[in-house]
Amino acid sequence: MSGEAVARPMLILKDVHKFYGANEVLKGISLDVKEGELVTFVGPSGCGKTTLLRLIGGFTEISAGDIILDGKRINDLPPNLRDTRICFQNYALVPHMTVAENIGYGLRINGWPKGKIRARVNDLLEMVELQAFGDRMIDRLSGGQQQRVAFARAISLEPKVLLLDEPLSNLDANLRLIMREEIRKLQRRLNITTVFVTHDQFEAMAISDRLVVMRDGLIEQVGSPIEIYERPANRFIASFVGYVNFIDGRISLIDEATRNTFVETEYGRFEIALEQADIAAGDEVLIVVRPEAVTLSLDVGIKRPNVVCGTLKSYMYAGSLAKCTVEIGTMKMIIDQYNPSEAHHFKQAEQVAVEIPHRVHLLKKKKQA
């Protein structure tokens, strides 16, 4: 049999619920995480993502449902017997211990002999590029170095699942980017199943095999970063993951042979390449337009498909891009123009032509009951 083997599920969540009194924080979460996969839970504050991570690690008691790790139900096991390890947001390192002692702490309390601990710690120090820091105290490390120590300690016992609770949130922007790449590189090298929680959707998209978008204790959508970004399941997801513009419209015609679709809006007719099978003529839709997908020009008055005229209201230079706001009728559209050194002439413009791409995502509106 040819083809790549499908990885088996390492972690299975079955209809997981969590109540705090009458407040239901998790309302039935079901998900399979494959062996070696990095899955990230994202969502607004209070959606339940951190609670879910703590349930998996055994730090919070489950109310209903099952957590299955490598085929074994672990609902009732304490954290130290779950074969999971967690990197906390604040790293939770022991300040009076050296780097080596912090990394080897879990090995020591699990009864490893000293020689074996020393060899394992040396391997881990090399893995996280802290070979020269083994004897240093924690308070003499930078934030990035402390993060590496916490990561090394978490993987010291080779857990089946690594849990990352916003481990980069205390770092500055540049160091955060570097450590994100380091974590991803190590995760792939070790092929360790990883569950990551972050409030930063851009970080989640950069590091993950799959995203799990949550809201109000439920999963809204699961998919690759590209799927979530380019084909969001609803307006909430489209708005949460990146910037977005919405245009209200109605499907007037679908060419069944080519799947070219005409969408009537208050700004004119747009021709869209329809991908979804559940949209039909007469449906009310939202055109999902990402800022980077729009093209600006000064060719005002030239009739072309999918081009409308607007007034440039703001032009903000931000280094690698210029972020523009264009007013089109009653709508204000956010547009990202890359290579702004060539686009600076828009700054002086009043009227601009805005071109909506042929391939954009459509969201079908729910019919009112």
Image (cartoon, rainbow, N blue to C red):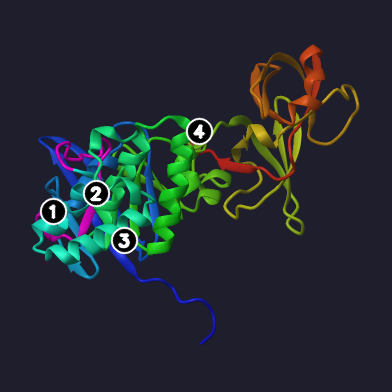
Residue 288 colored magenta?
A: no
The residue at 74%/35% (across/down) is 356
Q: Marks 2/3: CA distance?
A: 20 Å
Mark number, residue 239: 4
Q: Secondary structure at mark 2?
A: strand
Does the magenta segment cover residue 78?
Answer: yes
Circle 1 packing at 10 Å, graded few (<14), some (14-19), many (20+), is some
- Is disc 1 placed on a helix, strand or loop? helix
Q: Of the two numbered discs 4 and 2 on the same chain, state the one appearing first in sequence.
A: 2
Mark 2 near mark 1, Cβ–Cβ under 8 Å? yes
Amino acid of disc 4: Ser
Query: Mark 4 to mark 3: distance in Å?
Result: 44 Å
Task: Find the magenta span and give its range.
Answer: 76-97
Helix, strand or loop under label 3: helix
Query: Which amino acid lies under the numbered mark 2 shown in the image of this protein?
Result: Ile
Pick whichever of labels 1 and 4 is earlier in the sequence.
1
Residue at screen point 66% across, 25% down: 319
